[in-house]
Amino acid sequence: MHSEAAIREPLILGHKTYHDITQDIVGPIENKAPRGWYILFTIAALIAAYGVGCIMYLISKGIGTWGLNKTVDWAWDITNFVWWVGIGHAGTLISAVLLLFRQKWRMAINRSAEAMTIFAVIMAATFPLIHMGRIWMAYWVFPLKNQYGSLWVNFNSPLLWDVFAISTYFSVSLVFWYIGLIPDFATIRDKVTKPGMKKAYGILSFGWTGNAKAWTRFEEVSLVLAGIATPLVFSVHSVVSFDFATSVIPGWHTTIFPPYFVSGAVFSGFAMVQTLLLVMRKVMKLESYITIKHIEYMNIVIIVTGSIVGVAYITEFFISWYSGVEYESYAFINRATGPYWWAYLTMMTCNVVSPQVFWFRKLRRHLGFTFFMSIIVNIGMWFERFVIIVTSLHRDYLPSSWLQFHPTWVDVGVFLGTIGIFFTLYLLFARYFPVLALNEVKSILKVSGESYKKEAAKHHHH
Amino acid sequence: MANKVIYAVYEDPELLKEGARKLVSNGVKVKDVFSPFPVHGLDPIIGIKRTRLAIVAFMFGITGACLATLGIWYFNIFDWPMNIGGKPSFNYYQNLPAFVPVTFEFTVLCAAHGMVITYLIRNKTLPGMPARNPDPRSTDDKFIIEVRTADNQGHSAEVITGLLRTTPVFEINERQY
């Protein structure tokens, strides 16, 4: 059997058997939800309902209800879109990239991170759809023969690349997630006693048997999906960055954008994973599975990607001066010292300065502090997109057109609403779905479980 | 003689492999193994060949790349070339860099979904299919070897269970079928 160095911290604490793992995860699904869940769900559902109301108002009135003006014609909608897509990236990074690198710590967090990805991408996709104004014409983004003659969509346009990138990303993440869920649904199906639940999970589990050949195929499919989801995840945020980078707006027209956006996406995604998991491990008593070590690993990813983002900010600032293009230089000086200096300062503080405190081991292993930092990073990354989008647009070549952007209540309501919908979906997931990849966690129990490691170390010394 | 199916239940994947090795080395054919997670190293013991799903993914990927190329060429070059920003629209080759993202995404889309659909069909796991594992504990914490007497004309059920008893088996169940 594969064995692991004793010096590595265990990934499953205490003494657990295979049955304990099933019990710990399926138990909360079978039993009544704790009170905290109902409270959180009510709050999230209320915000979600308000958001749906705002979206319906927006669709019925048109996007004139947003605070956009002639100069700033892209603002919160696209900021929110990029923010949500970015958050989604952590899930795929954990499930695909860490699978290729054979990182065992991914197993306790990949299921919930992937769920986060799917819900975040749904929220992201909402924004371009409602931005179309006439959402019932959304199918026009597909290359379809239409009644106005043989006019097709433009495959040169980054906005169309986005359609393909986001829809591929969403559907591939969804099947990747579901393929992993099937065996765990089967575990729930075989465990629960209530006939209604048995039937429901029986349907969801697709009749999974867990025979030897099925598992061989399962592992191959997971590996191949990880292999193709890895370039996919990098391509998605690169394509999102092309929406800006291929334009000729000073402040957007930079070649650094794809890697800068991808690392920013991973950075913000891991922050959101921390926000969600720190609450979930407490409420659902998953401390044995999502350990301090897991939190620390994620904080290390946050400091690495945060530093890449910091280098990217400074590089683009330097290049704007070094390029000698006065409009480019002005865009960046205006960003840092113009009327939006506070947004720039927020972005710099939250994304570049504050993650550096994770160099201290004590702080990266501190739960309360990590939670606080995860919120800070989420705020910082929202401001990054706001800074890139609004500060580059609000002062164009004609000073008489210089304008500020002021969000309306619809802007705010739609954004808050997507946060509400996201948390509603996530809470439903936490309630009814296996929140840990049972089959994967069981497969590392004898190698990375605390009691088994101790046992192995004892034998080793003899 | 009625045909019998024997289920040998183990508590650990390593113990199960020991049991499977014992059976196979004595010429007993193992029908199947049911486990809550993949048992690494089991496939060569019970003679399971490597799956060809990766090849399937590759074929679907190639199909996707070809379809995307053909489609983009037809839509934007052949049927209705558009001159936007003076970008070359009169031949595919010169316009190619702008077509890379969509071609790539569509390749991934076809490879992933093609492989997954094939996987679900080959495993006979589709929405609404009934559970076919012999024992509900096999998705929880038990590892089960299935042996059928019909596959092993040379061995009686007693001989097979006798062999199993020499391994660290948890329990043995027999059923007529």
Image (tube, grey):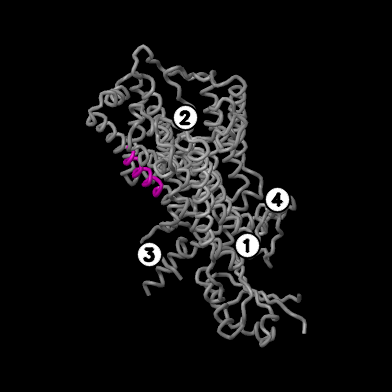
For disc 2, the marked residue is A78
For disc 4, the marked residue is A200
B85 falls in the magenta region? no
The amino acid sitting under disc 4 is Ala
Q: Are marks 1 and 4 in contact (CB under 8 Å)?
A: no
Q: Is residue A384 visible?
A: no
Residue under the image location 61 percent in, 28 percent down: A52
Q: Is residue A237 left or right of residue A59?
A: left
As rendered, which of B14 and A419 lies closer to the eye? A419
| Dot 2: element | helix
For disc 3, the marked residue is A5
For disc 1, the marked residue is B123
Q: Is residue B148 visible?
A: yes
Q: Is residue A165 left or right of residue A316?
A: right
Q: Quadrant of the C terminus of chain A?
A: bottom left
Say which mark, if any, is on residue A206: none
